[in-house]
Each structure stands twice: as C-alpha cells, then as structure tokens.
Image (spheres, rainbow, N blue to C red):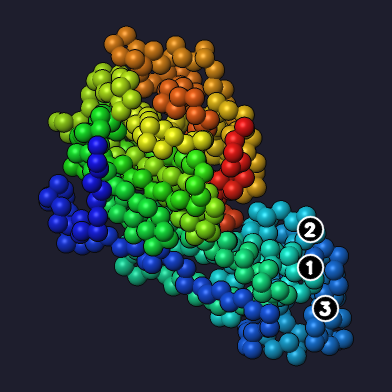
C-alpha cells in the first residue's frame, strides 16, 4: 500500500477540518517563536566588556585569574573565606567586584572536582546562575573557567553550565498580550580550547533545542495543538534537520486498520493522525521511539470530573512531544544511529460519534480491545503505534513513553517515571541513560499474573485492569511481539507548577534527554 503523506500545503485549505480552523490558526515553527533570547559566545579570549564576571571554581582551588593584582586576589580570598565558599559543587556566592576588575559584580560558582563532576549537578548550577543573573540588570556575562586547566574538563563543564542556563531561561509566552521581557543577556564563555569546547557546546545546544520543542508542543492548549497541528509543528521543526517526516491522515489510519487509534478521536472534529519521523544516521536496524500524542483528554464518556485534572490535559501529549524532541536532538547532534520516532495523535472528546464504554475496537494487528473505560485511551493509541513501527520498521529495540496512568503516580510519585521491560539489556541501558540526565526511573513488575486483569468476555482484551500501571503495560506488551521493549509511564513528570532547577514553570520536556542518551548508549548490535 502506497501512503500519501501530508506535504507542505497550508493546513488551512484542508477541507477535512472545515470550520474548526480560524484565520489566526497559522502554524508557526515553535523553535523560532519560543527560542531563548539569551546569546552564547564561545571564545579563547575574555570579552572586551562585561558587567558581570562569573568565575568557575574547582573545590579547594585558589581563586586567582590571569591579570589579577595581588590586592584583588587577597580581597576575593577574604570574601570567600567569610562566606564559607570552598568551590564545592552547588556553592554560589555573589559579591561586589573589587576595584580594577572592570565589572560591577563578581559571582563565584563551585563545581567540586571537575574530573568527577556529575553532569546534572553542573546543569543545576547553570540554572541557579541564570536565576541569579535574571534578578540583576546584567547585560554581558563573562564566564571564566581557567581554573580548570584540563581542556576536556574545561569545555565540558562550561557546556553543561550553559545548558543549565539555557534550559532554565526557556519561556512560553505566546498567548500573553504583554509578556514579561525574556532574559536577554549575552553569555561569553571563556574556554581554554575552542576545538574541545565547540563539540561539547554544539551537542548541548542541539539537546536544548529538542527540549524546547517538546516543551512547546506540550504547552500548546488543545485547541492549538490538535493532531494535525502537532504533526505540522513537528514537520516544520524536523525536516530542516534532515529528518524524513511522514504524516498519515485520518483516512490512511482507518484504511490501514488502526481502529484503536482512529476510535479515540472519532468523537472529535480533530481526527487521528500518525506521525513518523525517521533519522537515518546509519544503515543499522533502527531503534524505535513511540510516544503517546493524545492532544487533549476529556476522558470521553468516562468524563474526567476533577477540574484541576482536566485543565492539565494538554500535557497528555507530552510523551509524543518527548519523542519529537528526542528525534530533533538526535538529528541536531548528527548521531550515527538509525532512529524512527512514531507518534499516534488523537483528541479524546465527547460527541454523538464518540466511543462508548463497552465498544470494541480492532487494532492494526487484528487484535481486538474492549473499551472498558474511554479514559484509558493512551494504551489504545499506543497499541497501534507500537504495531505500526514493528510491522514497518522491524526495530531492534522499542521504547514507548506516555502519560499513561494515575496509578503510576500513586506507586512512585513524580520524581521517577515507572518503567516496564521485557528485556534486561533495554532496561539496564535505559536506566543508565535516565540516571545520567537525572530523569530517573523505577522498575515495576511486568508479570504474567496480571494477564487475567485485562481479559475480556467479548474481545481479545480490555483496556483496564488492576494494578493500573502494570495492566496498561501488559496490554502494550501484546503489540511488540518478541522485540526488546521498554514502556515508560511518565504521568506527573510532564510539567511543574513553579520554576525548579533546570525547569521554568510549565512543561518540562521530560524524556527528551533520557531518550537521546539511551540512543547513544544502546549497543548498535544488541545481544
């Protein structure tokens, strides 16, 4: 069957959506409309002019930069001693700059032992630095790490620090009539070796762009981030990076027999789509990333009755956003990996055509699912997404990610995501990647005894069971066959109510950094 993807024609002209569009529904590139206003400069020479000097200090190092006078060194040493500043990781001290430095403020940032500094701790230090700088009138910030003489550690620490600054400074303000001014400083990073530093900075900046894209897509309200719009946003962001993007229309989804994916959206004016984003960085058998893209969830006829819960439902597409963001980061880093991202896109609404509790849908695999609860829609669309990628790409491993169950939050809260795996190598490498980027995971059981909880009297299975998180995983496992696979339930990790660490308030972009790192560490030829 030859599939005809949506091309670059304006979505406004597509009769499929009719009056659901308005004149102001133009799809804009999210990386352009929400990228940071702060600027990054990498150089082996100090900036000619700066109002703020940041000195990156290893633990126990004497704070003395080239060109500092004896009196300056002594004054800074006294200030550090009184403040108890020793260069330990996370320590930060702001002081009035001594006369003769040519700056108005001096900030000391501790990074501990550069050879052992955890990446996420340095990123957190960068986020804290950004927060501090944003509360000043600083315009040009000189960041000097010459106290770290090793060029590899020097470039790496500065790139990680800059990454933390960037992630904290993201803003989603497209709907504010008079948005607050965005951070607009120029950060001038003084490196000891440009060649070492540039590779580190480029990788981190590509990763940050992937996180920004995921945050943008997650933050979009349901009326703006519906399936066709989400897919078009992703296409605009990914194609310039060299990613091959295909978007299956609702008619194609239905024609291919993906009745579970189609069914979730059948009650909405915004019907189901399937987004496929393929980065062919190598000729190896691909790794597959599958993300839940339910662009808004009313719960269907099993209506969500909690106002706070339904208000958060634009984040129900965060798993799909994470996959798009990860593919963007992977392509931006030009990783030599073959990666295919698949995002089943739906909008779970109520109308006279919506799924009813007790209805039966037929998936692309031919298996049938009784819809015992219309609010358990994520596993329905993921079932078809998993089947599609296995059927059409024969991946060597699959990771799916989704805001799937409230039961997950009951089990492990929001500091971890819950994972279920049918393969030890997949689990171990994913857990390693998660630990590296501090998007931590906790394994829950995927045990045959839970099979009976999703048994149905009238279909091959039903879409609910107990315990909820494990039941959801058991259903999804039926659609991956013997492919090594891991399911990531990120319910509760998609957003924060207030700024915290590397996250401003709103969508976190959770999963982008973990999936990108996993693609890096997963063996090219799995055992």
Identified at 72% across, 82% down, the residue is 97
Residue 226 appears in the picture as rendered: no
Q: Earlier in the sequence, mark 1 or mark 3?
A: 3
| Residue 110 visible in this rendered orientation of the protein | yes
On the picture, is 89 further left or further right than 1?
right
Q: Which residue is mark 2?
A: 115
Residue 420's x, y, as percent? 54, 28
Q: Is residue 371 left or right of residue 400?
A: left
Mark 1 and mark 2: span between their CA atoms? 9 Å
Q: Is residue 189 above or below residue 375?
A: below
Circle 1 packing at 10 Å, graded few (<14), some (14-19), many (20+), is few
Q: Secondary structure at mark 3?
A: loop
Mark 1 highlights which residue?
150
Circle 3 crowding by C-alpha within 10 Å: few under 14, some 14–19, many from 20: some
- Nearer-the-camera pick, 295 or 137: 295
Q: What separation in Å lies between label 1 and label 3 (alpha carbons)?
A: 16 Å
Is the residue 8 above or below the residue 133 in the image?
Answer: above
Name of the residue lying farthest toward the front: 283
Sequence-wise, the earlier of marks 3 and 2 is 3
Which quarter of the figure is the C terminus placed in? top right
Q: Quadrant of the N terminus?
A: top left
Tags 1 and 2 in contact by the CB under 8 Å rule? Answer: yes
Disc assigned to residue 64: 3
Seen as rendered, the residue at the extreme top is 457
* Whether label 3 touches label 2, CB < 8 Å: no
Which residue is at 34% across, 39% downward?
Answer: 344
Tag 2 or tag 1, which sits nearer the N-term?
2
């Amino acid at each position: 069957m030859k599939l005809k993807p949506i091309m670059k024609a304006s979505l406004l002209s597509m009769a499929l959506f009719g009056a659901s569009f308005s004149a102001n529904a133009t799809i804009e590139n999210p990386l352009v409309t929400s990228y940071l206003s702060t600027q990054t400069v990498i150089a082996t020479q100090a900036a000619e002019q700066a109002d703020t000097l940041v000195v990156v200090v290893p633990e126990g190092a004497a704070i003395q930069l080239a060109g500092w006078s004896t009196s300056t060194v002594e004054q800074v040493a006294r200030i550090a001693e009184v403040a108890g500043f020793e260069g330990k990781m996370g320590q930060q001290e702001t002081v009035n700059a001594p006369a003769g430095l040519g700056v108005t403020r001096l900030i000391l940032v501790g990074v501990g032992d550069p050879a052992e500094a955890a990446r996420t701790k340095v990123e957190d230090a960068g986020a804290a630095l950004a927060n501090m700088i944003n509360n000043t009138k600083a315009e040009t910030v000189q960041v000097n790490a010459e106290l770290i003489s090793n060029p590899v550690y020097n470039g790496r620490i500065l790139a990680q620090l800059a990454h933390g600054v960037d992630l904290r400074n993201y803003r989603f303000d497209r709907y504010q009539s008079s948005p607050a001014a965005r951070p607009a400083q120029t950060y001038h990073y003084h490196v000891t070796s440009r060649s070492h530093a540039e590779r580190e900075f480029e990788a981190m900046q590509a990763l940050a762009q992937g996180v920004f894209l995921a945050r943008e897509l997650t933050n979009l309200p349901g009326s703006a981030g519906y399936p066709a719009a989400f897919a078009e946003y992703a296409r605009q962001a990914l194609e310039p990076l060299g990613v091959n993007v295909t978007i299956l229309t609702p008619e194609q989804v239905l024609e291919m027999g993906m009745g579970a994916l189609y069914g979730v959206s059948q009650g909405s004016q915004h019907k189901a789509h399937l987004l496929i984003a393929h980065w062919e960085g190598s000729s190896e058998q691909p790794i597959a990333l599958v993300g839940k893209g339910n662009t808004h969830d009313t719960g269907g006829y099993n209506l969500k009755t909690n106002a706070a819960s339904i208000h958060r439902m634009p984040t129900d597409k965060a798993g799909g956003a994470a996959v798009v963001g990860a593919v963007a980061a992977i392509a931006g880093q030009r990783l030599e990996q073959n990666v295919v991202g698949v995002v089943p896109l739906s909008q779970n609404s109520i109308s006279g055509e919506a799924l009813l509790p007790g209805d039966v849908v037929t998936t692309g695999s031919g298996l049938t699912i009784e819809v015992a609860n219309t609010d358990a829609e994520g596993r329905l669309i993921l079932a078809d997404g998993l089947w599609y990628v296995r059927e059409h790409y024969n991946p060597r491993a699959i990771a799916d990610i989704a805001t799937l169950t409230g039961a997950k939050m009951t089990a492990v809260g929001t500091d971890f995501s819950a994972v279920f795996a049918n393969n030890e190598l997949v689990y171990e490498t994913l857990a390693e990647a998660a630990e590296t980027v501090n998007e931590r995971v906790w394994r829950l059981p995927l045990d045959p005894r839970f099979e009976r909880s999703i048994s149905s009297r009238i279909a091959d299975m039903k879409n609910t069971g107990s315990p909820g998180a494990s039941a959801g995983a058991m259903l999804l496992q039926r659609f991956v066959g013997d492919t090594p696979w891991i399911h990531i339930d990120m319910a509760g990790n998609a957003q924060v109510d207030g700024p915290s660490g590397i996250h401003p308030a709103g969508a976190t972009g959770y999963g982008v950094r973990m999936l990108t790192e996993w693609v890096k560490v997963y063996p090219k030829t799995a055992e």
